[in-house]
Structures are given as C-alpha cells and as structure tokens.
Image (cartoon, rainbow, N blue to C red):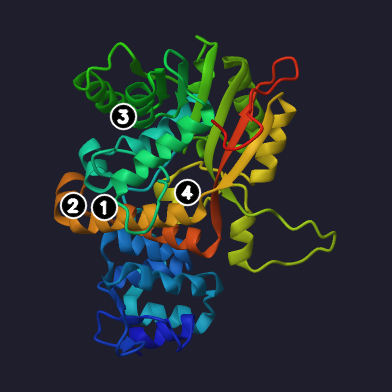
C-alpha cells in the first residue's frame, strides 16, 4: 500500500498535476507544471477527515502539503475535490498509512477563524473584518503595492502596471459619481484610504472614509497627513450603520458590501439612501455570484455549480474558515432590485470580471516575488492562506464562477436624475 495508490483511488488516475507522497510514491504526468507534495502523515489525516477543499487547504496552510511549481496549475485539481468520497476500504488504507492518528482530530491551524455571536451583528462584523484586514499593513503592502488598494483595478491592457490600473479604477468611480470640487464624498469600507486620497487630491472633494479595521485607519490617516490632505480627507473607525453626518453629495462603496450579508442588504442600501443628497449618486462596486436556476423542476445540481449560486460561502469552505468569515455574495439582479426598492434609480451596471482576474494575478505575482518577506512578516501559514485564496479567486473570475459589478444609482429629485443623455456618465 502506497500513498499514491490511496490518492489515485480518491481522485482517479488521470490527475492534471503530479502528486508525490512522503513515502516516495508518485502519480500524475511526468512533465507536470505543478507537483503537490504530501510531506507528512498528518496531511493524509486532514484529507480523509475532511475530504474536499477544506482538508487539502488545512494541510497546505500547515505545510503538511506543499505546492511546487505553478500554483494556478496546481489548482486545476480542485474540480475533482467535490467528488471525493471515502469508502470502508479507503479508511483502512488511510489507517495503514497514517496509523491510529487517522482516528483522532488534529488541531485546526491557528489561521482559521472562530467567530462568536449573531451573524452580522456589530460585534461579529468587527471580528470578521479584523480577522482579514488587521493582519499587517506591511504584509498587504508587499502584494498590493504603493496604492494599498485591495479591490479590482481597471486595466487598459494586460501589460499595464498595477498602479496605473488602480488609478484608472478610481478615476472611473469618480467619473461615474460626477465628483466636483467642494462636494462631500462618503467612501464606505474605505480600506487604506485610496479612494479618499484620490478623490480629494484629483477631484477636490471633501472625502470621508469609514472602515472597521483599526490597522487601516492607522495607515490611511498617516498617508493623508503626509500627503498634506488632512483638511480634505479623513478616515474613521466606524460601522456604516453608525454614520449620521449626512447628507453627502456622493457615496462610493468599493469591495465592501460582500461583508454586509443578505439579511442586511435592504438595511444597508436604505441607510445609504438616507445619507445621500436628493440628486446625489451612489456607486456600489462588489463581487457577485451567479443567479440561481429559475426552472420549476427540482434539479440536483453538481457541487461546483451549486457553489456558484450559494448566497454565502459554505461554513466548511476554505474561504469562510480562513479568508472572509461570514462573507456573502449577491446576485447583481437582486442588488439592483433592492436598491430600487429602497428608492434609488439604477442607471448603469458594468461588469469588470476579467479585470479582477488580472488584478489577482498581479497580487499573486507580487506576493510570490516577496515570499520570504511575507513569511517573516506574518508567518508561513498566513502567507500560504493569501497565496491560495488569491490564486483560486483569479481562476474563479476567469472561469465565470464569480463576477464583479459596478452599479451606479441616483437618488432622484422631483423626477430628475441628473444623468446626461449621452455620451458617458460624467
């Protein structure tokens, strides 16, 4: 009995990548661009106890499983993971390989989130945001680059630089909002203050950003002061539900509302409606999921397809446990409907799906080129989490499993939208 034979019984013999065991056995193409290496019997324990992506992910985060070569190529294996089912014979084989350890639960890696309290309560939302964003400003700088912008960029071509693409994204948002000097802008979920500094510095806006991350406030406040914009831009540690200093002329929300939750979506947009001036514009930029089938027939969907239409990530998924706890994706049609139900008039919807794939690949390249620094800054486990999730997300956007949309809406004033007839939106 070899480890390779057990893996082959779970995944089949035609694996797209090579797999090597700690016992020296191997399956897969001889010329594979990526090799998955199981370095410890504990990797077997994790995989058989949680067959599917969570078991493999835990083994990778701990280093019990490693990837040599192209991470994107290695992730082609994931399409086989939902099919894994262990029979009695395979449990016996696993016990022979890993010993009695297969009967006992291994401790979960410390990078895994364990949130308490009611989902999307203020306290739990703060904990979820802190888990992801309060890791280390220096760590984020290694792969985000000087702009410290953690959202989809706008690429004129794949050869453009990440910095130029992020600046182009901010210009696009400012253009859609028709920002003008002296106007008040609210940026909800402002991250490290990129939109605040861009809107204040390039469009003369009085910009306010809010975030639940103390590390982001620390970074953004320093950056704003160093840029001499303290009189025009500010970032506050604040829950969007507690914002009460409206009205604002325009509101942007870039890569934040994935944290809001389906149950609070109406409350979220209703509050933005209250905060924006009549005639003011709101732009919501967020990741979206595929729509659910509308056929009345009850069709049993394959696991990969069902994962596309789920409103939130599975509680047993790698993303929910390690990356975005409590994250929920919304179908863009339902977003438009909710925005209009609370009083907005939606005027423009744009998909940037391919742009996010390019952005994520740029981040992965930056992280890999600064790997030793990343490990020194946050530890190997945390660096592995980010490498895995960003590479997998890039493939999701490329395959159309997920998308991202900018939805531009206006709070009408006496039937007037303020949107020009043609051309453009400025």
In the figure, 181 relative to 44: above or below? Answer: above
In the figure, 108 relative to 350: above or below? Answer: below
Disc 1 crowd, CA 10 A, few/some/many (<14, 14-19, 20+):
many
Q: Which residue is mark 1?
A: 383
Any mark on residue 216, and which?
Answer: 3
Mark nearest the camera among 3 and 2 is 3
Can you give x and y, in whole percent of width and height, for residue 414 in the image? 74, 14
- Secondary structure under tag 1 reads helix
User: Which of the 4 image quarters holds residue 182?
Assistant: top left
- Nearest the eye: 58 or 162: 162
Proximity of marks 1 and 2: CB atoms separated by less than 8 Å:
yes
Can you give x and y, in whole percent of width and height, for residue 35 in the image? 30, 78
Proximity of marks 4 and 2: CB atoms separated by less than 8 Å:
no
Q: CA distance from mark 4 to mark 2?
A: 22 Å
Tell me which label, 3 or 2, sits earlier in the chain: 3
Disc 2 crowd, CA 10 A, few/some/many (<14, 14-19, 20+):
some
């Amino acid at each position: 009995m070899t480890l390779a034979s057990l893996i082959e019984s779970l995944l089949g013999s035609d694996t797209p990548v090579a797999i090597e065991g700690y016992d020296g056995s191997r399956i897969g193409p001889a010329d594979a661009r990526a090799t998955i290496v199981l370095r410890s019997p504990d990797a077997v324990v994790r995989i058989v106890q949680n067959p599917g992506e969570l078991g493999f992910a835990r083994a990778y985060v701990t280093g019990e499983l490693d990837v040599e070569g192209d991470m994107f190529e290695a992730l082609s294996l994931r399409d086989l993971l939902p099919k894994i089912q262990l029979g009695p014979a395979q449990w016996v084989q696993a016990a022979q390989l890993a010993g009695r350890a297969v009967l006992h639960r291994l401790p979960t890696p410390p990078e895994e989130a364990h949130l308490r309290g009611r989902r999307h309560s203020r306290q739990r939302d703060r904990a979820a945001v802190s888990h992801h964003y309060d890791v280390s400003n220096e760590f984020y700088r290694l792969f985000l680059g000087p702009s410290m912008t953690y959202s989809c960029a706008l690429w004129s071509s794949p050869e453009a630089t990440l910095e130029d693409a992020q600046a182009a994204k901010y210009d696009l948002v400012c253009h859609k909002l028709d920002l003008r000097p002296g106007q008040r802008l609210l940026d909800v979920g402002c991250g490290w203050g990129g939109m605040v500094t861009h809107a204040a510095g390039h469009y003369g806006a009085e910009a306010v950003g809010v975030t639940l991350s103390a590390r982001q406030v620390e970074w953004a406040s320093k950056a704003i002061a160093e840029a001499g914009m303290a009189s025009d831009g500010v970032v506050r540690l604040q829950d969007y539900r507690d914002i009460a200093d409206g009205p604002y002329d325009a509101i942007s929300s870039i890569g934040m509302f994935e944290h809001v939750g389906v149950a609070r979506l109406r409350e979220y947009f209703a509050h933005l409606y209250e905060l924006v001036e009549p005639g003011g514009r709101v732009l919501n930029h967020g990741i979206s999921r595929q729509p659910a089938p509308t056929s009345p027939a009850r069709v049993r969907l394959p696991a990969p397809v069902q994962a596309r239409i789920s409103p939130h990530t599975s509680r047993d998924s790698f993303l929910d446990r390690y990356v975005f706890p409590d994250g929920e994706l919304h179908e863009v049609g339902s977003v438009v409907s909710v925005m209009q139900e609370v009083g907005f008039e939606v005027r423009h919807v744009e998909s940037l799906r391919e742009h996010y794939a390019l952005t994520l690949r740029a981040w992965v390249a930056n992280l890999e080129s600064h790997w030793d620094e990343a490990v020194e800054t946050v530890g190997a486990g945390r660096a592995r989490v980010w490498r895995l999730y960003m590479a997998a997300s890039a493939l999701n956007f490329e395959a159309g499993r997920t998308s991202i949309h900018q939805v531009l809406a206006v709070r009408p004033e006496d039937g007037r939208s303020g949107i020009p007839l043609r051309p453009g939106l400025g």
